Amino acid sequence: MLWQDAQNRVYLTKELDRITGQGHSAISVTDTLKIIECREQRKKLSALEMELAAARQEGFVSKQSSDMKKTPEKGPVIVIGIFTSFGRKNDRDAIRKAWMSTGAALKRMEEEKGIVPRFVIGRSANRGDSLDRSIDSENSQTNDFFILENHVEAPEELPKKTKLFFAHAADSWTADYYAKVNDNVFVNLDSLRNALASYVSVPRAYIGCMKSGEVFSEQGHKWYEPDWWKFGDGKTYFRHASTELFVISQALARYISINRALLRTYAHDDVSVGSWFIGADVKYIDDRKFCCSSWSTGAICSGV
């Protein structure tokens, strides 16, 4: 507060000189009031500066100065959001056993490798019901959920869930990368970390198994797109990363966080994410190791 007030002193002095130093033979009532106000501010600033000087002599250091001297803590390499839903505890347990770890092992992975995996879920439409209570109970034992408190869990709301995950994850962790993966996908974390290391110098990276495909305009179709007409006469989606697993860099997660209220969602989460980057200076990285069809040499993921 003191240093902010001191900064205003230069402006106030210039304002006083401007009003009084230009040879005016008469000044208005408004200018007179400004002069009086400026003089009062000068007195207050002088008193504040004296208080600040006395405080410094007694060893006072401002929070801003002390914070600047601190070495910033290194954030995680990657935050992985494992998208799950109600009634899928068996799938979550399979992931915990196969590649995510639990308890002390999970904590060690976060601290030593910089990998932070969390199951991502919203809340029940009937807030506080047995579905919510079962998740809260599970989380109290495992402490590995990232619960979107203001999101209603529903299949048709998956694109909005994806947007909220990236926005809130960027607000909660300062990571190099943020990933979205489905809870029926197994991930080779060492391969994932090695792949990301090769892209560390790429700004605004959007990494995944890139694809496009037909836009379906027929109501009732499994992949029906209500906004099909926006995709042109050819009815083909633009390039985007497949939903099973994809990664975005910190700058893109922050971009989503800042613009969450403006970013449009479509019928499918992977298409929605791709649409957010169309007009931005984003580096698309089509890495086939992110295609989760089956395990192969160097593969990062595999669908179950």
Image (spheres, rainbow, N blue to C red):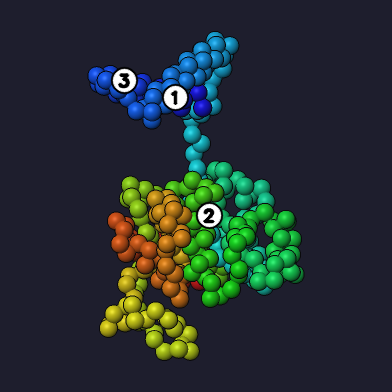
Q: Quadrant of the C terminus?
A: bottom right
Mark 2 secondary-structure assignment: helix
Dot 2 alpha-carbon crowd within 10 angstroms: few under 14, some 14 to 19, many 20 or more: some
In the figure, 277 relative to 220: above or below?
above
Q: Which numbered tag is attached to residue 168?
A: 2
Q: Which numbered tag is attached to residue 20?
A: 3
Residue pictured at 53% horizontal, 72% vertical: 157
**In front here: 79 or 30?**
30
Dot 1 alpha-carbon crowd within 10 angstroms: few under 14, some 14 to 19, many 20 or more: some
Question: Where, by quadrant of the figure, is residue 145 drawn?
Answer: bottom right
Q: What amino acid type should be assigned to the residue bearing mark 3?
A: Thr
Q: Are marks 1 and 2 in contact (CB under 8 Å)?
A: no
**In front here: 8 or 96?**
8
Distance (Cα) linking label 1 and label 2:
45 Å
Q: What amino acid type should be assigned to the residue bearing mark 1?
A: Glu
Where does label 1 land, which residue? 37
